[in-house]
Image: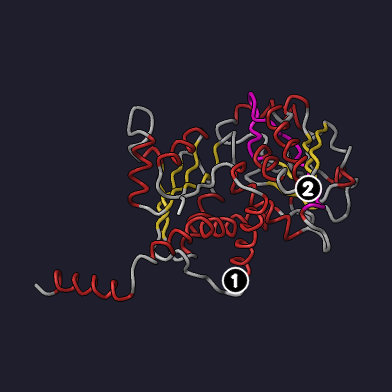
Amino acid sequence: MEVRHFIETDDFTKEEYLEMLKVIKTLKDAERKGIRLPLLKDQSLAMMFDQPSTRTRVSFEAAMTQLGGHALYLETKTLHCGEDRETIKDTAQVLSGMCDAIEIRTESQDTIIELAKYSDVPVFSGMSSKCMHPTQALCDLFTMTEYMEDGKRIEDLVYMFIGDNSVLGDNIGGVCRTEARLLSKMGLTFISCAPKEAEMAPEDAAYCKAEMEKSGGKFIQTNDPYEYIDQVDFIATDAWWYHGSDHLKDKKIATFYPMYAVNKELLAKAKPSVKVMHNLPGNRGYEIADDVWDSEQSILIPQAENRLHTEKGLLVYFMYPLLKEKEALHTEEDIVYYKDVVDELVLGK
């Protein structure tokens, strides 16, 4: 069976994403009834981080535990991996010989791609800083399916990402980039709303438009948050500055605030049913006003919890078939045989 990785949203079809959503929902429904299926019993996940993390680290680690497996938290600085040390190729081969999957959060998307190239087990991207955050994008799609109005389909949704939409220069719009590229496959309407200096990179916008033509959706760009707000079902934003970019705080505030903040004035022009999203961590009072952050329209906390359910679904989707394939190589008699041999060798002395 081919080993597949979850590192680029472009690698999967709408049908595959719908399958993933079904797995995520099934496991979440089971969890709500107190059922935790040990589908990955005794499996190990190596988690490589060279950046701080709350939701990604906890969600992957808790997901493996709830599925009967184990996660190893590995700070890159504590490994023999990096510049002037062990190569990414060697690290990938060593870890995939000891563990059943690898998750990695790092600065460079190229590092993640190289790791996957030489890994014999599934690799999951936990984010490359400015480029791609696929688990977050899938989580947000799943969250929308939970909160969309009765009778609506994914294809009926209007989603607006407001704020930093670019990965160029000092911008850090990797989440917007990832979500736009994934959601363009799903046939909904994606509105990219940003000031000119933070508009989506032309190549990303072109990709999304081309995918929308195939999926039947719409890709819209605007500099005016109010232009389409009355049509929006979900309005999402991201941190304007993040760890490692605190020195840009004043510049970012000058660029985005208050025009591109999600506040009561903006929501007053929206449908009463509109929901507010943020992948977190966020800067309260800036990307989202405090009275919106804690309002009934905010689904930030359920959205964050859904990272856990999304990770569980992804781990099962990519790892469980490989585990079942291995299990098919032996019988119960084989297990008894090898146990008896070990008993004789160790206990029979």
Could you tell me which secondary element the residue under label 2 belongs to? Answer: loop
- Quadrant assignment for the N terminus: bottom left
Q: Quadrant of residue 211?
A: top right
Disc 2 residue type (three-letter): Leu
Q: Position of residue 338 (x, y in %)?
A: 24, 70
Residue under numbered circle 2 = 188
Could you tell me which secondary element the residue under label 1 belongs to? Answer: helix
Q: Residue at x 59, y 38 (%)?
A: 132
Using the image as rendered, state which of residue 191 and residue 236 is in the foreground: 191
**Left or right of 346 in this view: 326:** right
At label 2, counting other C-alpha atoms closer than 10 Å, the crowd grade (few under 14, some 14-19, many 20 or more) is many
Compared to residue 152, the image places residue 90 above or below, namely above
Distance, label 1 to label 2, CA atoms, is 28 Å
Please state the total of marks drawn on the protein image. 2
Sequence-wise, the earlier of marks 1 and 2 is 1
**Left or right of 331 in this view: 187:** right
Q: Quadrant of residue 342?
A: bottom left
- Quadrant assignment for the C terminus: bottom left
Q: Position of residue 15 (x, y in %)?
A: 66, 54
Disc 1 residue type (three-letter): Ala
Compared to residue 246, the image places residue 118 above or below, namely below
Residue under numbered circle 1 = 30
Using the image as rendered, state which of residue 241 and residue 185 is in the foreground: 185
